[in-house]
Image: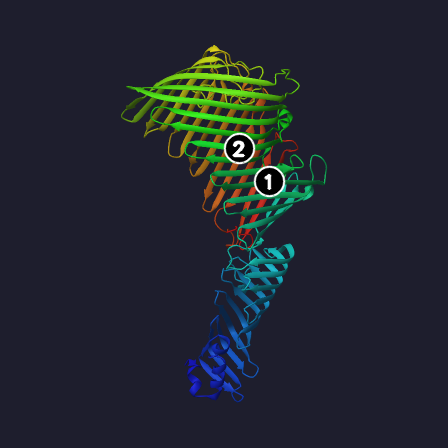
Amino acid sequence: MRSIFAILISTQLFLICFISTISYSENVNGLGVEFTSDSLEIKQNGNIMIATGNVIIKSKNREIIAEKIEYNKQKDKGIATGNVIIKEKDGSKYHAEKIILENEFKNISASLLFGTLADKSNLKAKTFVKKENDVSFFQEGSYTACDCDFKKGETPVWELSTKLTKHDPKTKTIYHNKVVMKLLSFPVFYIPYLEQPDWTVKRRSGFLTPTIGYSKQNHFETSIPYYLATKDKTWDMTYTAHYKGKSGHANQFNFRKQFETSFLDSDLYFGNLDTNKQKDDDVFGFIYNFDSKIKNWKLSSEAKYSDQDTFMKRYNFDGSTEYKSFIKAEKVSENKISDIEIYNIESLEEGVNSQNEPFMAPNISHHKFISNEFLNYEVKLNAHQIVDDERYDIQRWTGSTEIHKSLNFKNYIVDFDGGTGLDLYNINGRPAHDSNDNRYIDKLSLGVGLSASTEFINSFKNFDVFIEPKIQITSMHATDRTEEIPNRDSSNYRIDSSNLFLLNHFQGRDNIQNNQRVNAGIDTLISSDNFGDLTFFIGQSQRIGGSEKGLINTFDRQSDFITELDWQFSKDHSLNLNSLLDNHSLKNNYSNISLNGDLYGINYSTSYRSIKDKLVSDNKDREELKIGLNKNYKNWNFGYNNILDFSNDNEELVSEEIVVDYLSDFLIQNCLSINLTYKETGGSPDRDIKPSNSVYLTFKFKNLGDEIK
């Protein structure tokens, strides 16, 4: 029969003494204790108590269950034996065959202890000590977040074997000394000291997910990030050690700071890597982004720098082929947009393009637009200075106005467009091949356009049809400055549906010429339950007077035919086609075809793009095919991407990538996930970037590199 020690006060002096020490200890220590057991035995004049059978010791912070406990009052020492279980208030649970209780049961020590922490992670230790302040020590132990039972001899996928582990609930930290990282009991990594947040912490310093890879260029390489969380939650930092195998090493510091209305994100890189200059080259680079809001102004800034042209891209720190550093302030109101921008561009490409590294200081623009029931008009003011734009140094001041008026006549819509502008140039420098010595240039322009369109809508049994033909006549007049002003705005001009009905087809204001045009196009929409929605456009521009100079591709009065098709032929599949067809032969000068959808659970995306040499500044054909496949199966994701270059009748692999990823939290024993990426690169337009192939394994260990929360 179970005995309740609190009831025995009136029967035995020993129990009065014992209970005054234990049951009413909250008066001394703020901790109440209750005992129950199946039987009780008193020895040595009441100094020894032996409780057996379902012994339970309950206090404010824990519960201890054992088959037997022997307590010595004089020594204030209890020994609990027989399948001992310690249940902590925080949810942790420990198992041992024998534990020693001291200091009114506040101190606990054990040999060969097994435990499950509140977050379901597991540990074992040769010895265990818990002090009055609830600080725990585990000597010669092992820690893992895997679902495995140490007590039954199960082997975890990974574990941390330590000389000493300490858990301090006040600092909410678990400290490990002399740590050996093991995968399936095989040691793979050693670190003298490691600390991690305990299960109560959501944001805490610690190691994040490491990456292990192999590449033809570097051989074995690793990246090990460490996250630093501060008490001030407005900023944090991540340090990553990148070991690039035989090519060297680099350090990366990522710093983030949140201000009241601003945010800063920056990366600093430095180290010792092989470059195209030399082996063991000291390298330095940084990337910085800043966004802020000051009253009605939005301020943004970005800067990129590398002291050695391509090491950032070569070692996968940044994939840009050019670095644009800028400061931009923008103000947007109901009918106004104002912005100021200063930027510099550093090119990483080969050949002529590598010499085109313009510096803009500054570009100032103001755009005002008003719309009412009578008229729509826009006013634009712009001033900029650009230096080293393919060896040109130019200052330009521009003022322009555009108006638009629509009129309805029964089933027809008539649109009137007008525009005028004044451009002033100060050309301070020209490249050697430009012999024109005019420095101060002014240009006045005036353009008008008149267009008419109508709509035809018909519904049939199985489909609906919408057709809108449009025709426009434009006349542009400008001071002839084509030979004097460098055409930096529209040198790679291609006509398409977005600029077909503009007064001046060519982008920007550098190339404005005297010409008259007839522009026409037809928009068609066919909607059907049987074959989906089909949108189609065809258009062309006919020059009926004036000139067309200063372009890569000068049309013979008639432009290419513009064709655009967008076909959503089912809920899961779509086809898009944009092309420019030669007005005489109907051969493709430009085409961009993409097919996207989902087939038997496989997401696919394909695109084919080709540009004829006459539309490209270097007079070289471009032809490229991209294929992407993606499949989710249960918790797995399989991905494949391929880019092929068919330029100049050659087939060259640009890149090929295979990705295998586990999407759920953790794959193996609920504690480990693996991401596998294989990538092969072929030719590259970047200096110093050689074809290579690589394999990367990213391991995600539960509680050792979880995502920052």
Q: Quadrant of residue 111?
A: bottom right
Judge depth for marks 2 and 1 and give the one in front. Answer: 2
Residue 204 at least partly seen: yes
Q: Specify the farthest residue to the bottom.
A: 45
Where is mark 1, residue-wise?
287
- Residue at image point 64% right, 35% down: 310
Q: Is residue 108 above or below residue 39?
A: above
Residue 309 or 113: which is nearer the viewer?
309
Q: Is residue 515 above or below residue 428?
A: above
Q: Secondary structure beneath disc 1?
A: strand
Q: Secondary structure beneath disc 2?
A: strand
Left/right of residue 10 with respect to residue 646 in the rendered view: left
Q: Residues within 10 Å of mark 1 (few under 14, many from 20)?
A: some
Q: Is residue 200 above or below residue 511?
A: below
**What's the mark number on residue 340?**
2
Residue 650 or 59: which is nearer the viewer?
59
Q: Quadrant of the N terminus?
A: bottom left
